[in-house]
């Protein structure tokens, strides 16, 4: 869709051809065509579901329904730029499933955003919410743009117009957005304000991840990184024999990467390399993350930090370390670089950072992978706490939030690790099986209308 004119005909065509090769026979009601939805990430999400459906003997009609989103919206977003020109952007909101409750999922601003990426991430959200036992379905949204080229005013107008274009889809009982790549608390505040002005009263629970002063939850901003750090410590203990001061490499130093690095640093782990979009830094003796955070606040990037050497993002992934945490983009570890990795444990802070081929290779070579739907579920879990507090007018302390988060992460880790060990399957397959089976049970109980 990038750079093309969006008109009704193009949209209809896109949606009717929203498909990938079906289940290998005539079962699919969707035509077999190739469109932008066939992004790497969407095919990856589908192939994961196919694998787990086969392993657990999921009924064909449920399998087929779950391979596609429940609904998807593509919107054109005209924005007045600072030079008074008007530029149109393309935005998406996809709800993969709403069986267990309202749809829930982040909104990202990035040039990689397209229908396939958003649909894949919405599917992952369905499994993640079901795995964590949250009363939500899965959704995702995004705008195809280069957020780093937009002024604050342009970003605000883009966000507000996008919100008004998808306003019929979202709502505290329907679909609740949250931050993701290149969106943050401020973005959520603009969405909440735009929605509230349109309905005529303040509706804090239409988004999560908003600032605490307008109904956000204490602990939300750190929640994803806190959860990633928690899973890392659990996996070190359960699978690596509790290595003391393990060496850690973190790709991405945004919300998830920086908080994860900070928490692990505080727990005595040795963070030997980190990176952001501009490049990485390495110090085999360990990086002082507290000081690095101050450096990034001033310089806007990790490069140039004292006592570190620069390293490219590609080389960073190949460093020898005990634990590797990709916390930036999808599809970072693929068949092109997986053979060069030198790590024992990978904890997926980002969504979909490992391709299916690379995942199989890692399994064959006994590298433990804690999958995204477990590792980064801390964010949606505390989003749920924020939503509940908003709906019930409750105010929980940060300690209360962190304690509840730890309880749910602990329970999910117990369930996934146990199923993986008992059935001798990868952690990813165990996590997906738990999520998919909860959804299948709910679909059975609710039945099919009409
Ligand atoms: P963010 O925008 O705060 O940070 C992204 C980081 O990645 C930045 O440091 C950026 O410079 C870096 N980056 C971008 N391109 C890169 C590249 N090519 N190589 C290396 N680094 C690069 O985003 P975030 O919220 O931290 O999200 C990161 C990942 O975590 C995404 O995959 C997102 O979907 C996932 N995630 C986020 C949350 C959340 O609550 N924020 C929850 C679950 C999953």
Image: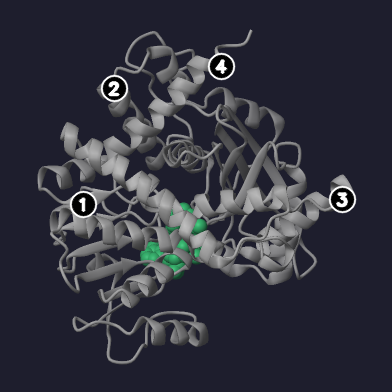
In the rendered image, which quarter contains the N terminus? top right
- Label 3 vs 2, first from the N-terminus: 2
Is there CB contact under 8 Å for labels 4 and 3? no
Is there CB contact under 8 Å for labels 3 and 2? no
Q: Residue at x 65, y 40 (%)?
A: 175
In the displayed structure image, the side of residue 195 where residue 309 appears, left or right: left
Residue 121 location, x and y as percent? 47, 42
Is there CB contact under 8 Å for labels 4 and 2? no
Q: Secondary structure at mark 4?
A: helix
In the rendered image, which quarter contains the C terminus? top right
| Mark 1 or 2: the one toward you | 2
* Front residue (pair 441, 367): 441
- Label 4 vs 2, first from the N-terminus: 2
Find the distance from the CA under tag 4 to the CA under tag 3. Answer: 33 Å
| Mark 4 or 1: the one toward you | 4
- Label 4 vs 3, first from the N-terminus: 3
Residue under label 1, please give it: 336
Q: Secondary structure at mark 1?
A: loop
Please say if 62 is above or below 162: above
Find the distance from the CA under tag 1 to the CA under tag 3. Answer: 52 Å
Q: Secondary structure at mark 3?
A: loop
Find the distance from the CA under tag 1 to the CA under tag 2. Answer: 31 Å
In the displayed structure image, the side of residue 141 where residue 262 appears, left or right: left
* Front residue (pair 161, 223): 223
Return the mark for residue 201: 3
Return the mark for residue 56: 2
Residue under label 4, please give it: 446
């Amino acid at each position: 869709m990038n750079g093309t004119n969006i008109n009704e005909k193009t949209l209809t065509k896109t949606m009717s051809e929203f498909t990938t090769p079906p289940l290998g026979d005539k079962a699919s009601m969707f035509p077999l065509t190739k469109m932008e939805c066939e992004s790497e990430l969407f095919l990856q999400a589908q192939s994961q579901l196919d694998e787990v459906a086969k392993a657990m003997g999921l009924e064909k009609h449920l399998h087929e329904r779950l391979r596609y989103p429940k609904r998807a919206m593509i919107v054109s977003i005209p924005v007045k730029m600072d030079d008074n020109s008007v530029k149109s952007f393309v935005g998406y909101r996809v709800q993969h499933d709403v069986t267990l409750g309202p749809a829930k999922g982040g909104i990202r601003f990035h040039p990689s955003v397209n229908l396939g990426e958003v649909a894949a991430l919405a599917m992952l959200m369905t499994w993640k919410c079901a795995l964590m036992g949250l009363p939500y379905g899965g959704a995702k949204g995004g705008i195809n743009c280069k957020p780093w080229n937009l002024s604050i005013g342009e970003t605000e107008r883009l966000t507000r117009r996008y919100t008004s274009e998808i306003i019929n889809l979202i709502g505290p009982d329907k679909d609740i957005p949250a931050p993701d790549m290149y969106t943050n608390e401020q973005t959520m505040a603009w969405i909440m304000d735009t929605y509230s002005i349109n309905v005529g009263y303040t509706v804090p629970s239409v988004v999560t991840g908003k600032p605490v002063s307008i109904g956000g939850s204490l602990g939300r901003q750190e929640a994803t990184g806190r959860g990633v750090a928690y899973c890392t410590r659990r996996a070190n203990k359960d699978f690596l024999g509790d290595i003391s001061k393990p060496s850690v490499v973190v790709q991405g130093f945004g919300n998830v990467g920086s908080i994860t690095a900070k928490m692990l640093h505080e727990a005595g782990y040795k963070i030997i390399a980190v990176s952001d979009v501009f490049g990485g830094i390495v110090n085999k003796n360990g990086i002082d993350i507290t000081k690095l955070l101050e450096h990034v606040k001033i310089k806007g990037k990790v490069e140039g930090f004292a006592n570190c050497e620069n390293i490219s993002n590609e080389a960073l992934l190949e460093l020898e370390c005990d634990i590797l945490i990709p916390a930036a983009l999808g599809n970072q570890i693929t068949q092109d670089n997986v053979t060069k990795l030198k790590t024992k444990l990978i904890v997926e802070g980002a969504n979909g950072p490992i391709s299916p081929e690379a995942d199989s290779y890692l399994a064959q070579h006994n590298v433990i992978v804690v999958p995204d739907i477990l590792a980064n579920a801390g964010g949606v879990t505390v989003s749920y706490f924020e939503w509940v507090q908003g709906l019930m007018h409750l105010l929980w302390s940060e300690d209360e939030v962190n304690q509840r988060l730890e309880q749910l992460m602990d329970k999910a880790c117990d369930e996934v690790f146990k199923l993986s060990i008992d059935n001798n399957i990868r952690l990813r397959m165990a996590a997906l099986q738990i999520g998919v089976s909860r959804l299948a049970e709910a679909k059975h109980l609710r039945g099919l209308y009409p």
